[in-house]
């Protein structure tokens, strides 16, 4: 299957996907990286790995529909099967959602429906919950609201700092995302 990874930042989940492809646990091709932040670290990583990129600056477009239409064109040109959101910090609009409905997934650093939106790790930490985790879900028009595909748990003990929680969550993400993508593309999870 041909994957397009969408990211806006560091790209540690992009790295985990590339590692899983390289070590043979994920039977897919990282066919494209889409990034809305030209200066993001993930862009350098993709260039280094030889992943083709589509990098754009939303400010260069008069409306979201216009850059999403361009993205759809690039995705179709690359014959992309799945869109993998990995820290892409934008809601997906109708223009992109319609042609790829059921083929777009996201990873979120909480046990949804708890703590949707920005800084889910901080939200969970501040709430003092003792259990949080990671969710992989289908993307719909809402903010972190699509059907849940997989979840994994992270326990929060009283000594844990916010940074420690973040790194525990990231470790779980880096295992759960490639494993869930593998199940999906091999038909092991249904929508
Ligand atoms: C991850 O925590 C992911 O759950 C969230 O954004 C973060 C992206 O991190 N959606 P990275 O860029 O993959 O390191």
Image (cartoon, rainbow, N blue to C red):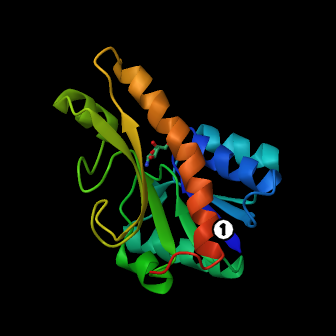
Q: Residues within 10 Å of mark 1 (few under 14, many from 20)?
A: many
Whether the residue carrying mark 1 lies under 8 Å from ligand 1 is answered with no
Give the image location of residue 6, x and y in percent.
Answer: 55, 58
Viewer-side residue, 136 vs 65: 136
Left or right: 89 in relation to 130: right
Give the image location of residue 183, x and y in percent.
Answer: 60, 69
Q: Would you name the residue on which mark 1 appears?
A: 3
Please determine whether, in this image, residue 150 is positioned above or below residue 73. Answer: above
**Which image quadrant for residue 66?**
bottom left
- Residue 91 visible here: yes
- Residue 11 visible here: no
The residue furthest left is 127
Give the image location of residue 58, x and y in percent.
Answer: 45, 57
Left or right: 126 in relation to 73: left
Viewer-side residue, 127 vs 58: 127
Left or right: 109 in relation to 24: left
Q: Secondary structure at mark 1?
A: strand
Please determine whether, in this image, residue 64 is positioned above or below residue 112. Answer: below
Image quadrant occupied by the C terminus: bottom left
Total number of numbered labels? 1
Q: Name the residue: 70% across, 72% down.
A: 2
Left or right: 186 in relation to 153: right
Please determine whether, in this image, residue 184 is positioned above or below residue 179. Answer: below
Q: Name the residue: 61% across, 58% down.
A: 179
Q: Name the residue: 22% across, 34% down.
A: 129
Viewer-side residue, 20 vs 4: 20
The residue furthest bottom is 99
Image quadrant occupied by the N terminus: bottom right
């Amino acid at each position: 299957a041909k994957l397009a990874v969408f990211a806006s930042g560091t790209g540690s989940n992009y790295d985990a996907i590339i590692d899983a492809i390289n070590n043979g646990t994920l039977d897919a091709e990282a066919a494209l990286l889409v990034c809305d932040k030209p200066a993001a670290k993930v862009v350098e990583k993709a260039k280094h790995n030889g992943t083709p990129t589509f990098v754009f600056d939303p400010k260069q477009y008069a409306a979201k529909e216009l850059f999403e239409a361009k993205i759809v064109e690039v995705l179709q040109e690359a014959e992309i099967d799945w869109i993998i959101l990995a820290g892409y910090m934008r809601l997906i609009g109708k223009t992109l959602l319609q042609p790829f409905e059921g083929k777009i997934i996201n990873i979120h650093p909480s046990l949804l429906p708890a703590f949707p939106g920005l800084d889910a790790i901080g939200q969970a930490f501040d709430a003092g919950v003792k259990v949080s985790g990671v969710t992989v879900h289908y993307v719909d028009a809402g903010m972190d609201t699509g059907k849940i595909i997989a979840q994994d748990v992270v326990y929060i003990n009283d000594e844990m700092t916010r940074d420690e929680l973040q790194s525990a969550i990231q470790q779980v993400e880096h295992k759960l995302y490639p494993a869930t993508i593998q199940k999906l593309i091999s038909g092991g999870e249904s929508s």
